[in-house]
Image: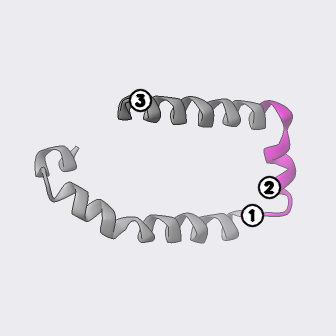
Amino acid sequence: MSRMREIQGAILVSSLLQIVLGFSGLVGLVLKYIGPLAIAPTINLIGLSLFIEAGKKSGGHWGIAAL
């Protein structure tokens, strides 16, 4: 299987999961207990942990990394 098909499949599955969560109203239920003060640091930590790997990958071609 090609790499592009794997990426397309992952995007498809994640978008279907997001649609199901949106229609079910589960997000509203979860947001009653988890506020933005818990979500923002979590997203920051995930982004910072991927920063080094993103730098390595973008070092190969600076033109694409600028996009």
**Looking at the image, residue 51 lies above or below residue 27:** below
Q: Which amino acid does label 1 sit on?
A: Gly
Question: Viewer-proximal residue, 46 or 35?
Answer: 46
- Give the label on residue 35, or none: 1
Asked if the residue at tag 1 contacts the one at tag 2, i.e. Cβ–Cβ closer than 8 Å, the answer is yes
- The Cα atoms of the two marked residues, 2 and 3, are separated by 38 Å
Q: How far apart are marks 2 and 1 (CA)?
A: 6 Å
Disc nearer the start of the sequence (2/3): 3
The structure residue drawn at horizontal position 68% and vertical position 36%, both measured from the top left corner, is 18
Residue depicted at x 16% and y 59%: 59
Residue 1: image tag = 3
> What separation in Å lies between label 1 and label 3 (alpha carbons)?
40 Å
Q: Is residue 26 magenta?
A: yes
Crowding near the residue tagged with mark 3, few <14, some 14–19, many ≥20 C-alpha atoms within 10 Å: few
* Magenta-tinted stretch: 23-35
Q: How crowded is mark 2: few (under 14 residues within 10 Å), some or many (20 or more)?
A: few
Which numbered dot is residue 31?
Answer: 2
In the rendered view, does 27 fall on the left or right side of 52?
right
The quadrant holding residue 2 is top left
Could you tell me which residue is drawn at 14 percent across and 54 percent down? Answer: 60
For label 2, the SS is helix
Q: Do the residues labelled 2 and 3 touch (CB within 8 Å)?
A: no
